[in-house]
């Protein structure tokens, strides 16, 4: 069976869901959340009363809980995931926060929502996990309302040496992952119909620092004070130096728009 067909991918992410405890409060997760929040505030801005779709619910199950923040700003949140385990955990997160959201089972290559449904979508680190990333991007175009805005992010080829090193020693936890240059991914987005409005990146921290922080969070939480100290200069630089923020993050980020005439 093709490793990228729906069932093997579901099994892979179900296994990850069972094997991974939430790391909401880890210092590097809070760093990640601040960078996601920055993108929302800069590129979405007016989300109160607007429908927003998030592709994959890993963050809501384990990580930054960015949809929790969006809901608290008044957004109407929807999302989907290929793992039923991750969906259950994401639902639990929203319930604990006493927030409502619509979560469905689905594959990003066949999004389980109707055409022209959403004012915004947020897809950070999802489409690169199968070779059919163009199919996924066309699906994102389909579900967005004419004139709607999306934020989409993929791994930065400038940073893929980390991925290669960790993969060789079986320490990269997220399976297949394709990396892009800005020019390459901009071309793909435009080919799929999107207008690219802005480009940037997030997570300028060394990926190995993220790995260390999560290891300590899991095994010696009191020592996370050390990684928190090491994270501060990266946070300061990414916040204040645009060249670094726009080019050297682990994830490239693009603000895109669907034509109002679509």
Image (cartoon, grey):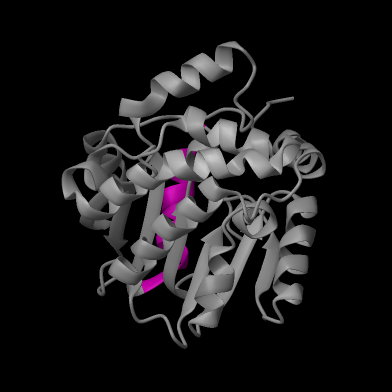
Specify whether 97 is left or right of 232. right
Point out residue 257 in the picture as x, y percentages from the top left corner: 28, 64
Q: Which residues are magenta?
A: 131-145
**Placement of the N terminus among the 4 image quadrants:** top right
Our reading of the magenta stretch's main secondary structure is helix
| Residue 24 placement: quadrant | bottom right
Nearer to the camera, 101 or 259 = 101
Q: Residue at x 44, y 38 (%)?
A: 230
Quadrant holding the C terminus:
bottom left
Is residue 162 or residue 28 the one in the foreground? Answer: 28
Q: Quadrant of residue 147?
A: bottom left
Q: Quadrant of residue 68?
A: bottom right
Q: Residue at x 37, y 59 (%)?
A: 151
Is residue 193 at all visible to an observer of this figure? no
Image height of 99 relative to 109, above or below: below
> Residue 37: where, in percent of width, then height?
42, 64
36 relative position to 59: left or right: left
Q: Residue at x 26, y 74 (%)?
A: 260
Using residue 220 as the reference point, say whether residue 123 is left or right of it: left
- Residue 137 visible to the viewer: yes
**Is residue 159 inside the magenta stretch?**
no
Rendered location of residue 183, percent (x, y): 21, 36
- Give residue 15's position: percent from left, percent from top: 79, 37
In this rendering, the count of numbered labels is 0
**Is residue 133 part of the magenta span, yes or no?**
yes
Which of these two is toward me, 72 or 193? 72
State the residue lying farthest toward the bottom.
Answer: 49
Q: Residue at x 50, y 15 (%)?
A: 165
In the picture as drawn, the residue positioned furthest to the top comes out as 168
Compared to 253, does 261 lie above or below? below
């Amino acid at each position: 069976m093709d490793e990228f067909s729906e069932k093997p991918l579901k099994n892979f992410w179900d296994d990850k869901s069972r094997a991974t405890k939430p790391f909401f409060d880890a210092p590097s997760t809070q760093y990640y959340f601040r960078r996601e929040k920055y993108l929302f505030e800069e590129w979405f801005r007016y989300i109160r009363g607007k429908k927003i779709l998030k592709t994959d619910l890993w963050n809501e199950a384990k990580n930054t809980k960015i949809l929790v923040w969006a809901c608290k700003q008044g957004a109407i949140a929807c999302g989907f995931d290929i793992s039923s385990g991750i969906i259950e955990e994401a639902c639990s997160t929203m319930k604990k926060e006493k927030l409502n959201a619509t979560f469905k089972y689905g594959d990003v290559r066949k999004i389980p929502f109707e055409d022209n449904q959403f004012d915004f979508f947020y897809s950070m680190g999802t489409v690169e996990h199968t070779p059919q990333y163009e199919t996924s991007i066309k699906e994102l175009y389909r579900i967005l309302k004419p004139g709607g805005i999306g934020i989409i992010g993929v791994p930065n080829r400038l940073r893929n040496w980390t991925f290669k090193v960790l993969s060789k020693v079986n320490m990269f936890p997220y399976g297949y992952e394709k990396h892009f240059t800005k020019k390459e991914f901009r071309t793909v987005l435009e080919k799929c119909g999107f207008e690219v409005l802005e480009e940037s990146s997030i997570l300028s921290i060394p990926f190995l620092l993220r790995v260390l922080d999560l290891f300590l969070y899991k095994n010696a939480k009191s020592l996370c004070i050390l990684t928190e100290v090491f994270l501060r200069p990266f946070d300061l630089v990414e916040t204040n130096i645009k060249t670094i923020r726009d080019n050297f993050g682990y994830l490239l980020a693009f603000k895109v728009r669907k034509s109002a005439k679509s």
